Image (cartoon, rainbow, N blue to C red):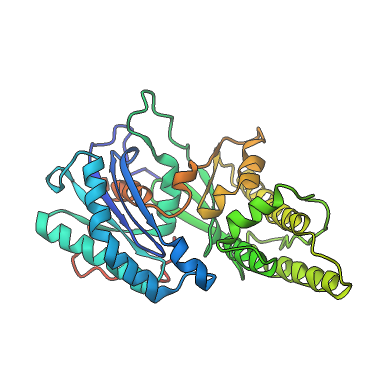
Amino acid sequence: MMSRFSSDLPPARVLGIETSCDETAAAVVENGRALLSSVVASQIDIHAQYGGVFPEVASRQHIRTIYAIVDEALQRAHLGLTDIDAIAVTRGPGLAGSLVIGVNLAKGLAIAQNLPLIGVNHLEGHIYSAWLYPADVPHPPPPPEFPLLALLVSGGHTELILIRQHLEYQRLGGTLDDAAGEAFDKVARLLGLPYPGGPSIQKAAQDGNPQAFNFPRARLEGTWNFSFSGLKTAVLRTVRELESRGRNLPIPDLAASFQAAVVDILLQKTFHAAKVYQAKAILVAGGVSANEALRNAFLSQREFPVHIPPLSLCTDNAAMIAAAGYFHYIAGERHPLNLDVLPNWTLS
């Protein structure tokens, strides 16, 4: 298929806005890659008391902070809205009440400055986080090569996506139940570890033996799908059995063994798909890609080039939305001002 993109891409500065869940973020990206600024206001401390994201609280917090976040992103980039070529905003998937805050602000700015408006899929944004680099880097790294096999792992998604060219996605499979990040949160709660579960499990696992417990791996042969509910249930049964015998829970060993099982199945499935579809490289993105064990497992092999964003771009941010928005912008895509949010928007 003929690509819509030439090797010499036109210059453009895109302001990105992200409010899909509990991070309020804005960023300015130049030419789809050079990161001029990125500002993220996290709500983790606010939602920790609930053991997860409380949607209504998240929406109110977005309202309180979003204007200041956008203004700071422009100031850090030493630019004004008159220097921006387009506005990209997360349209979905995510929490409807949170998405509306970002989309409405983006519409207002687009009207005020007569700028093109581009609604971006949040998952697509995670993919394009691998294209970003700090603008002050003297020698930019080469972008990922196509065809590219992407593993998207976060609190709400675990998916394998084949990317043949910019903006061309084929969803191979995804989780049938809990996403990997959701499984981390639930197991952390089971072990009495604080929210969010990913960092808590990783910290506890540092002193544990990943082979202490042989937790199951759901391989789901013949598909590219994932399942983590059986693994979560196995941890629950092990905890109840240990407690019934009056034993103290070996938290580090349980955390390390659970983490090893998740990493193992993600690694095996991704590499199998990369071989079958003859990918030139692998991309791992999303909040769970910040997990040290997962990063090390992918980066330690030599069979495929692996692209994993820096930790600051693994969790939700607006730089990735601006980067994805750039490629839609130069492809001539525009959205009308009646753009609505799509909380369950799939990437295809």
Query: Can residue 269 be seen from the camera position used here?
Result: no
Identify the image quadrant of residue 183: bottom right
Taking the spot 27% from the left edge, 54% from the top edge, the residue there is 69
Residue 289: x, y in percent? 55, 49
Q: Decide which of 15, 193 is in the foreground and name it.
A: 193
User: Up-down: is 26 above or below 339?
Assistant: above
Taking the spot 16% from the left edge, 63% from the top edge, the residue there is 108
Taking the spot 82% from the left edge, 72% from the top edge, the residue there is 243
In which quadrant of the rendered image does the C terminus lie? Answer: bottom left
* Lateral position of residue 337 relative to residue 155, left or right: left
Identify the image quadrant of residue 195: bottom right
* Lateral position of residue 129 relative to residue 250, left or right: left
* Lateral position of residue 103 relative to residue 207, left or right: left
Residue 230: x, y in percent? 73, 69
Q: In this view, which residue lies farthest toward the right?
A: 245
Identify the image quadrant of residue 96: bottom left
Query: Can residue 317 be seen from the camera position used here?
Result: yes
Residue 106: x, y in percent? 22, 60
* Lateral position of residue 173 relative to residue 25, left or right: right
Taking the spot 87% from the left edge, 72% from the top edge, the residue there is 246
Residue 8: x, y in percent? 29, 32
Q: How many marks?
A: 0
